[in-house]
Image (cartoon, rainbow, N blue to C red):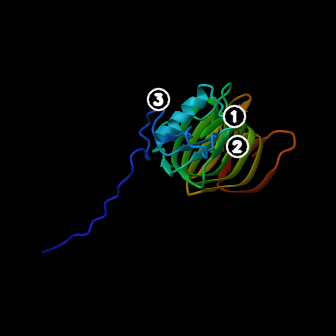
């Protein structure tokens, strides 16, 4: 008798995104049990890709999640499917997104005619923390970054690794493009072929304000500390 060894990999349903966004709240979107007196009424846990896509759609429909903490419960693979950034002008994210040390992999955003491109598009006093992103291709018009396109709030302990390709025509960064935000203890470490790139399009979209971590820093009192980047940075000026 001969026996062959083999390895079977079982991937739990929902951990790899198929590109669909559910219209109804999926099972993986865990909200507090109203009958549990010890449950945190402001905590939501995301356990699969359908729940993450549902969350994004809810924010973009006008739910800011202000006062809420949305926690990632599992490593998730976005599978290079076209991702719509979480939050945009008029419907930004204002809560706290806690990555819980988990990793989102294979983020793909291509929206070259729009501002605020990234996993999150626009933050409005929102916080993103404790999140890893591995492999990311993010392209937008302006305010482009892997974690967030920009605006106000905090980014803490967020790290981007693997093949990283970020491109836009104004305010382009490896973590965040347009920062009226505090950014701390975060890093970008790209594999060969990675870049953060500003490309000239036209007047006022001239491929400028480009950085490995932050593209553009707004005025005012904010904190930037514990930041590092190992990646090619390209642009026309203010690089």
In this view, 91 is above or below 213: above
The residue beneath circle 2 is: 127
In this view, 146 is above or below 91: below
Where does the image place residue 128, in percent across and percent down from the top left?
A: 67, 45
How far is disc 3 from disc 2 in space, using C-alphas? 26 Å
Describe the element under mark 3 as helix, strand or loop. loop
Question: Which badge, 3 or 2, is on the more N-terminal residue?
Answer: 3
Describe the element under mark 1 as helix, strand or loop. loop
In this view, 203 is above or below 98: above
Q: Viewer-proximal residue, 124 or 231?
A: 124
Where does the image place residue 228, in percent across and percent down from the top left?
A: 71, 57
Position of 121 with respect to 1 (left or right) is right
Q: Nearer the viewer, mark 2 or mark 1?
A: 1
Describe the element under mark 2 as helix, strand or loop. strand
Q: Quadrant of residue 9?
A: bottom left
Where does the image place residue 7, in percent across and percent down from the top left?
A: 31, 64
Disc number placed over residue 131 in the picture, else none? none
Query: In the image as oriented, which residue stretches furthest toward the right?
Result: 220
Residue at 27% x, 65% y: name it.
6
The residue beneath circle 1 is: 66
The residue beneath circle 3 is: 24
Q: Viewer-proximal residue, 214 or 100?
A: 100
């Amino acid at each position: 008798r001969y026996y062959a060894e083999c390895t079977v990999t079982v991937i739990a349903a929902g951990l790899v995104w198929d590109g669909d966004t559910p219209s109804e709240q999926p099972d993986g979107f865990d909200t507090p049990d109203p009958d549990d007196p010890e449950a945190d009424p402001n905590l939501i846990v995301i356990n699969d890709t359908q729940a993450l896509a549902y969350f994004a759609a809810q924010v973009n429909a006008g739910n800011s999640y202000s006062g809420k903490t949305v926690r990632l419960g599992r490593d998730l693979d976005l599978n290079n499917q076209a991702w719509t950034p979480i939050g945009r002008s008029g419907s930004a994210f204002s809560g706290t997104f806690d990555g819980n040390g988990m990793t989102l992999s294979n983020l793909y955003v291509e929206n070259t005619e729009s501002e605020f491109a990234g996993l999150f598009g626009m933050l409005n006093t929102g916080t993103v923390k404790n999140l890893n992103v591995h492999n990311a291709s993010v392209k937008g018009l302006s305010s482009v970054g892997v974690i967030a396109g920009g605006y106000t709030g905090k980014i803490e302990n967020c790290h981007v690794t693997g093949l990283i390709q970020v491109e836009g025509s104004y305010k382009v960064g490896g973590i965040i493009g347009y920062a009226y935000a505090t950014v701390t203890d975060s890093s970008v470490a790209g594999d060969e072929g990675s870049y953060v790139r500003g490309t000239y399009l036209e007047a006022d979209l001239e491929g400028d304000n480009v950085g490995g971590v932050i593209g553009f820093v707004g005025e005012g009192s904010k904190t930037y500390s514990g930041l590092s980047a190992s990646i090619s940075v390209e642009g026309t000026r203010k690089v």
